[in-house]
Image: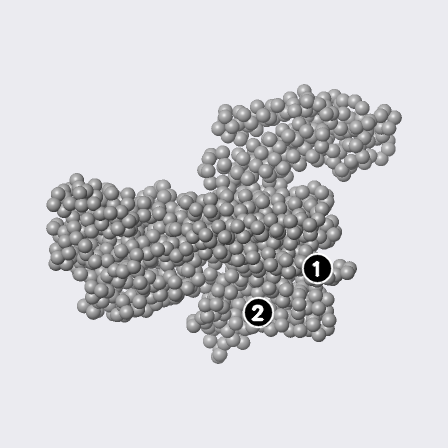
Amino acid sequence: MRGILGFVLVAQLLSVLLFAIGFFPQKNVMNGNATFSINKKLQEETKQPFKKLVLIVIDALRSDFLFDESSSNFHFVHSKLNSGEAWGYTAYSNPPTVTLPRLKGITTGSTPNFLDALLNVAEDDSSSNVKDQDSWLKQFHSKGYRMRFFGDDTWLKLFPLEFFNDYEGTNSFFVSDFEQVDLNVTRHIPRQLEKTEDWDVLILHYLGLDHIGHKGGANSKFMPAKHREMDQIVGKLYDNLDEDTLLIVMGDHGMNDAGNHGGSSAGETSAGLVFFSKKLSKFKIPIRQLNARLPITSNSSDYQYLTQVQQMDLVPTLAALYNVPIPKNSVGVIIPDFLQLLDPNIIDTKLLENYKQLLELSKVEYDDELFNLNVFDLEKRSECQRIMKTLQEKLIAATTEYDYTMLAIGCFMSLVLTLVMAIFSFFQMASNKYFFASVLLASILGFSCFGSSFVEEEHQIWWWVITGCLFISAAKTMHYFEHSVILLCLRLIRGWNNTGQKTVYPYVISKILEENSTLQWNLNALTFFVISLNGNQNSMWGFISSSTLGILCLAYKATWAVVNKEIVPWYIQNIMDNCASFFQDGNKKDYSSTLIPMASFFLHSVAAIIFFTLLWGKFNKHHPSFSLKCISKYVTILMMFLSSSVNIPQFLIFEIMRSFISKILKKHYNSNIYLTSLISLCLQNFAFFQFGGTNSIATIDISNAYHGISENYNIYVIGVLMVLSNFAPSIYWAMFSWDIIYDIKETNFNKWASFTKSKIPTSLFNCIVGLCLMLACVMFRYHLFVWSVFSPKLCYFVGWNLFMNAIFGWVLEVLLLSITN
Amino acid sequence: MSKQRKSKQPIKKRVTFSDDTTVTRQSHGHKKDSIDHEHPPVFVRKTWLTIPYHLIALLYYYIYGSEFDSTTLLFCLLPTQVAYLIVQFNKCTIYGNKRLKINYSLLLVSIFASLLLSVPAAIIAVLFGAPVVNKLFETWLLGLHASFLSYPVIYSVFNCDFKVGLWKKYFITIIVGGWISCVVIPLDWDRNWQTWPIPVVVGIYLGAFVGYTIGSYI
């Protein structure tokens, strides 16, 4: 029986993976480099308006940070915009709005594909680079421009290093660092300004603003200072550069008010874009800017300021201004305002070149009749621009090709498996209402896959299901007190974080705790105290080991907070100092240097203690539940270690809920294994969302994946820690079922029979939901939200299946069970 | 009325909040001689008379007439519920083997009790996920609606020996109606009727309608 279930699990994973391979194919790109095609000689000989280029990318620079009165502190930029020496735009950045795909868009001018968004998180080196793709950097390089780059090392992974004659990358992953990451870029500027003749193109990419957003949201108190810092840098560069230099300041994407990005909301897709040059004041200012006075007072929240352009339009614009061919895959259209800067003889040629390149990309034959250089007047020019815009829209909307064979295989396999599993579980759980409960639950979730808003707001569905179940249970058993306590706990957890995409509540518990650090740390200390103590009253070894781990973890979290300039109460400071003294040489009070040794000591201790507990249990022939109980305690502390400090008190609430739920299950439901497994499934999902997780790529939390990792990190360790930290609450609730399934009081206890029984409802659930999700993805493959809703959901589903179900639920649990007696 | 009756009884009084299923079952074959005079059976007659037509009218007004003005709806609900209790619901409530006359002072007491009960109702709504801080008034309004929807039941609870067990199902249908109606909240249709608490108000009205209609059959 276990064999059949295991087979279903593997086959189901396979079907989802096959489907995903068909759903996320690599996009076809045109290879080779572009060359001039019309009036080659004229183009090559023309005089270009600018000789040098300085590009400053400020990560997550939303349009209002540059232009809006209420949030912008870029005073230098405002003054130049008002004097006409700078032209400002709101640049639409195509989702997925994360750095790597956006950089591809900015440099190659192509629309991003969904895999890039994932690779941005996974930081995979091999498949995401654009070394073979045509980009303006490549064109600049082959024209002999000497380029320099300082900033986010994503650029260095994207492009061959020989493009740059001087470079330094900064790492984008220590998200809590707002200052050093930018100082590491800024310190190169004086040297560059001293010897401007040594370079032609200077690219700077600042990450600090994005980090502030991730940490404190768009209205963080650190924002104004960061704006001023960036503004000063822009001012310094601008003042020291001559007329022949174009300075561009831009964001690669925006952010929402919570500081996240990745999706397609107005805040995330509206990035700022400003061109600076002393030369610009000689030309006609863009019409929308002419009537505006910066900073703009705006009361709408659509983040649209001044002229709106596509971010990709930068690519042909740069190509025209610096007289290089437009990169082959670019879908950009030259920004009309910049045509006046070109040599009057060449304007039409450049336009036609752009038009022809877009036609080639849309695989339409170039028609000589429509536009001919000999009869190009102003009217023709504007018509050409209009046609290019329509072409661009079509190109952006065109989705990638799907691999239909793979999709069909995946769906078919999943359908067969679902039927097999349904029949199998119907007979296994025979005449059991929990079979129907599992099917009902899976159907609700499966049905919800077909609605994009239900996918975005999946936490609401889990909340709805859980409150419903609790209500039924309360009405049935009539033990209102226990049920009310659980409901209260659930409600507190629901109010802890903002999740989903629809509503952002201003008052959530995590925000309140962030503002009252004393309260937060008192609660955290209480949580560690309770978790270490609870359930260990009779076991000396359990008590000592878990309290040691608890104190160590608390000390580490507090040190981390202090390094990040938070304040902790005096008694935690004491514990922290005592612990820190073990990891420091000498007496100097440098907390940041203790972080890594402390964390790695903690991680090693957890591993060692789990190992000894298993060994001890084996040696003394303990009941499996004994070892499992100890291990779940250690893993809980590990999960707290991997959670952000505002979420730690949730574990205290979990602990209260857990004891009440166990009590109810044992008293009124006879410790039914199917029910336990279903409840565990619901709570795993519920807690995942209430920790701040969603079905969007934007909320994958990477800030907790770097504990105990030194500079020369191993990508796989970080990957494992990232997955663990994102699934931390789910792991807690997966372990909750161990208490009941492997209960010591159970007569004629057979651990393998219990294990198999507990896996039937989850397997059934995964089969049904997987099938529905695949069908939804196929059905909505041309839907507007396919990249922002359905694809991320599919990725999350793979993640849940692969990690929570296969690795944690099967591999680790089987391993633990076979080691224990 | 219940107070008078109780004061005449010298025997020790018992107020029970438990689910008195035996009493409800007796309602099918009640005989005069089997009636326990201290705790006579209480039940609701199975008749068309219990259907609360006014709730449908109110909903119609709410949706098409008032552009989802929950406050006005509440002011309309109160008199119609009192009328429904007097004209319809009380006539179907059988205490022992007779209908009880309307106790007018108890009507007022029940209104007051409903007002008070709106607070626990709002708390229940919050526990079931209603927003607390920024939409507190709306949540309380929802609580008011819920408690006035159950006004006839509250009156009957007072009037018939506090046999909460019998009346529980009416409260439950209201809650279930509200619970089901939450489904529309996450949808991204951006309609004005999706704002809190409109969907749930509609849901509890429908729940109450179903409850009062088929309550006697459950």
User: As shown in the figure, which amino acid type bears the numbered disc 1?
Assistant: Ala
**Chain under disc 2:** A
As helix, strand or loop, the secondary structure at mark 1 comes to: helix
The structure residue drawn at horizontal position 46% and vertical position 38%, both measured from the top left corner, is: B189
The structure residue drawn at horizontal position 49% and vertical position 62%, both measured from the top left corner, is: A722
User: As shown in the figure, which amino acid type bears the numbered disc 2?
Assistant: Leu
A169 or A497, nearer to the observer:
A169
Residue B161, above or below A301: above
As helix, strand or loop, the secondary structure at mark 2 comes to: helix
> Is A90 positioned to the left or the right of B147 in the image?
left
Residue A338 visible in image: no
Residue A485, above or below A755: above
Q: Are marks 2 and 1 on the same chain?
A: yes
Foreground: disc 2 or disc 1: 1
The residue carrying pointer 2 sits among few (fewer than 14), some (14 to 19) or many (20 or more) residues within 10 Å by Cα, namely many
The residue carrying pointer 1 sits among few (fewer than 14), some (14 to 19) or many (20 or more) residues within 10 Å by Cα, namely few
Q: Position of residue B137 (x, y in %)?
A: 54, 37
The structure residue drawn at horizontal position 59% and vertical position 47%, both measured from the top left corner, is: A442
Which sits earlier in the primary sequence, circle 2 or circle 1?
A: 2
Identify the residue under disc 2: A552
Pick the quarter of the image with the N terminus of chain A: bottom right
> Is A555 positioned to the left or the right of A88 in the image?
right
Residue A721, above or below A378: below
Identify the residue under disc 1: A753
Q: Which residue lies furthest to the bottom in this view?
A: A586
The structure residue drawn at horizontal position 64% and vertical position 30%, both measured from the top left corner, is: B210
